[in-house]
Image (cartoon, rainbow, N blue to C red):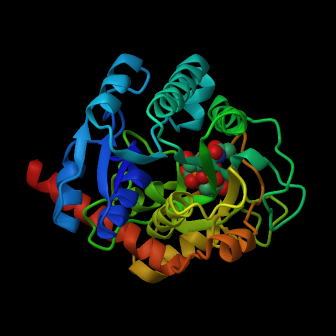
């Protein structure tokens, strides 16, 4: 079974490619390598023993995408990760984000339609809930006005998908991820932030290894147990596995409605300071950090009600915060070794 994975050399995409290949799928990656490297394809091959097909181009190039589908007529399904994802950058360059994330999305759905590829899994985000009205937040919670163009592109793509599904043969699942962290147990793939990381865990591991001087904890005056923000962190491999379940649900026609939405998290919330302490505990490293003011646009607390995914998809997250942070650290150590050799 041939499956297209856009953004397949990215952080979540690469872990999903590994899981797909381990289940015997024939994976086709399209990635423009704007936020990843070709070495990830080698790493995937090292892990699984199979080299995924790889094409490097931007999905905004519709002619290239149409040609790709022409060359690969047996593709049956698509998991779509390719998108820009830096919140701050999206505020500075909104049109870059609207252009890239929306044009690529429309091109992909059009080309899929032209080629009768009717199974589609979309990577959405819990960012669509903003500051949720109730916790744990379930899929019926209100969608809040997005605080960033990045978040808005996720909302708009969900709407485009739902509208397209209503009027075509397309069947789709949107997975709303909570906070993916950690890395593959092989430490051959993981998150590769370019420049200074925006997200918490890469910043933590880079600080511990000495690439950053100290972690800044954004705010300790929130209405939470210790004053720092609470998130639902999920191991990237658990998240990758949710994609396999979702695509199989579509391919086997088990979906109840043509468009379905699932929260993908652990259902447990941890504060920033709990993450710091757990990291110190599992690695034995002392983390240099300071409390600073709040970061604009941060929600105070969010964690998932995952019962719908648990019951309907038959999927649940298996790995706990300690395992997530251990694997993130193993990945950082592996990266620094590689960089050391290069230097
Ligand atoms: C952010 C985005 C979200 C996106 C996700 C993945 C916002 C509002 N949300 O989620 O839409 O899907 O990234 O790219 O930007 N923190 C620190 N110090 C740091 C970094 C983070 O204290 O140096 C704190 C943050 O304040 C937050 C928590 O750690 O409370 C997690 O932050 P982060 O990893 O950036 O994820 P989100 O902000 O939840």
Question: Depth check: 220 or 74 in front?
Answer: 74
Number of on-image labels: 0
- Quadrant location of the N terminus in the rendered image: bottom left
Taking 116 as reference, is 122 above or below it?
A: below
Residue 35 as seen in the image, left or right of residue 38: right
Residue 178 as seen in the image, left or right of residue 48: right
- Residue at the spot 78% in from the left edge and 55% down from the top edge: 300
- Residue at the spot 49% in from the left edge and 60% down from the top edge: 201
Whether residue 23 is visible, yes or no, is: yes
Residue 240 as seen in the image, left or right of residue 87: left
Q: Quadrant of residue 333?
A: bottom left
Q: Which residue lies furthest to the right in this view?
A: 133
Question: Depth check: 321 or 14 in front?
Answer: 14
Taking 164 as reference, is 294 above or below it?
A: below
Q: Position of residue 96 (x, y in %)?
A: 53, 20
- Residue at the spot 39% in from the left edge and 42% down from the top edge: 7
Question: Depth check: 157 or 321 in front?
Answer: 157
Q: Where is residue 115 in the image (x, y as percent from the top left)?
A: 43, 33
Question: Depth check: 60 or 36 in front?
Answer: 60
Q: Position of residue 27 (x, y in %)?
A: 30, 52
Q: Quadrant of residue 72?
A: top left
Whether residue 291 is visible, yes or no, is: no
Q: Position of residue 284 (x, y in %)?
A: 40, 81
- Residue at the spot 53% in from the left edge and 60% down from the top edge: 180
């Amino acid at each position: 079974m041939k499956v297209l994975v856009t953004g397949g050399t990215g952080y979540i995409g690469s872990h999903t490619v590994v899981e797909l290949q381990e289940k015997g799928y024939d994976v086709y990656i399209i990635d423009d390598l704007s936020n990843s490297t070709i070495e990830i394809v080698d790493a995937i091959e090292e892990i699984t023993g199979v080299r995924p097909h790889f094409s490097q181009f931007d999905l905004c190039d519709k002619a290239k995408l149409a040609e790709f589908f022409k060359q690969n007529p047996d593709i049956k399904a698509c998991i779509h990760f390719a998108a820009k994802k830096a919140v701050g950058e999206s505020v500075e360059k909104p049109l870059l984000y609207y252009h890239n994330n929306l044009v690529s999305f429309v091109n992909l759905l059009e080309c899929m339609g032209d080629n009768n590829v009717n199974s589609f899994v979309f990577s959405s985000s819990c960012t669509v809930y903003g500051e949720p009205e109730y916790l744990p937040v379930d899929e019926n919670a209100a969608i809040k006005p997005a605080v960033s163009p990045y978040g808005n592109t996720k909302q708009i793509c969900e709407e485009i998908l739902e509208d397209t599904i209503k009027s075509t043969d397309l069947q789709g699942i949107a997975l709303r991820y909570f906070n993916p962290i950690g890395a593959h147990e092989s430490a051959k793939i993981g998150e590769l932030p370019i420049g200074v990381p925006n997200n918490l865990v890469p910043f933590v591991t880079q600080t511990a290894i000495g690439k950053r001087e100290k972690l800044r904890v954004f705010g300790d005056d929130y209405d939470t147990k210790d004053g720092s923000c609470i998130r639902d962190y999920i191991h990237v491999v658990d998240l990758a596995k949710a994609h396999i379940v979702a695509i199989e649900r579509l391919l086997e026609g088990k979906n109840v409605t043509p468009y379905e939405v699932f929260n993908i998290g652990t259902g447990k919330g941890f504060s920033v300071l709990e993450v710091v302490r757990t990291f110190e505990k599992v690695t034995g490293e002392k983390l240099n950090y300071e409390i600073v003011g709040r970061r604009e646009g941060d929600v105070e607390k969010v964690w998932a009600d995952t019962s719908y995914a648990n019951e309907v998809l038959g999927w649940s997250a298996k790995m706990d915060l300690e395992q997530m942070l251990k694997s993130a650290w193993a990945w950082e150590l592996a990266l620094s070794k590689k960089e050391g050799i290069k230097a």
